[in-house]
Image (spheres, rainbow, N blue to C red):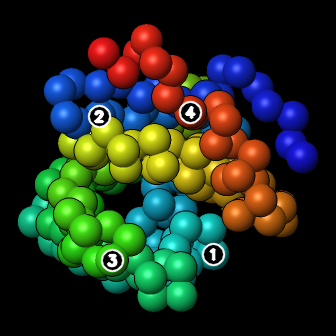
Amino acid sequence: MTTLDPSQIGQVSYDGKHATLTFQRRLPHPPEAVWAAITDPKQLAMWYVQEVTIDGRLGGSVHFVSGGGKLLATGRILAWDPPRLLEYEWKVKPRPEMPSGEDSVVRWELGREGDATVLTLTHRNLTRGKAIGAAPFAHVVLERLASHLDGQPFEDFVQRVAEMRPQYAPRRASLG
């Protein structure tokens, strides 16, 4: 098991029936390398999802398939400013395990800090229940991104998500 750095824990904030996930990471790679990792379909398939199609431009589209085809997310690109900003819709159609689907927005912001990148990942407009499930997943996805950029193998994804679930379990007081 990887040692957990408390500063790596993302924030889950609530506004009514919706939630926002926010993560920040300092990656020892230039923004151009991080940008390529989050926008190049071949790289994305190595660390994020199995199949990716991106029409990389403002108004373009994203199409992600993961989990052996169990998850299909699509959407329009709302912001495209290489190598600083990528924002897109994350639309998942209803299915048995997600009867209401999902209609949210994912935002990747890259800031230069010397030779490194400060990455801020925000996933907003999630329903409360889906946010709790998505938070440990997003945490581990960012660990996989860091491993990919470092050229290192990554431990078992499913096991790592299970290890991270308690870190993102809802606290009664914070659910308002």
For the C terminus, the quadrant is top left
Q: Residue at x 36, y 44 (%)?
A: 129
Asked if the residue under mark 1 is in contact with the one under mark 3, i.e. CB atoms within 8 Å, the reply is: no
Distance (Cα) linking label 4 and label 3 = 23 Å
C-alpha gap between disc 3 and disc 1: 28 Å
Q: Which residue is labeled 4 in the image?
A: 169
Q: Is residue 127 above or below residue 103?
A: above
Q: Earlier in the sequence, mark 1 or mark 2?
A: 2
Pointer 1 residue: 46
Q: Are marks 1 and 4 in contact (CB under 8 Å)?
A: no
Q: Are marks 2 and 4 in contact (CB under 8 Å)?
A: no
According to the image, label 2 marks what residue?
19
Q: Residues within 10 Å of mark 2 (few under 14, many from 20)?
A: many
C-alpha span from label 1 to label 2: 28 Å
How far apart are labels 1 and 4 at the CA level?
28 Å
Q: Amino acid at mark 2?
A: Ala
Separation of residues labelled 2 and 4 (CA atoms): 14 Å
Query: Is residue 24 in view?
Result: no
**Regarding mark 3 in the picture, which secondary structure is present there?**
loop
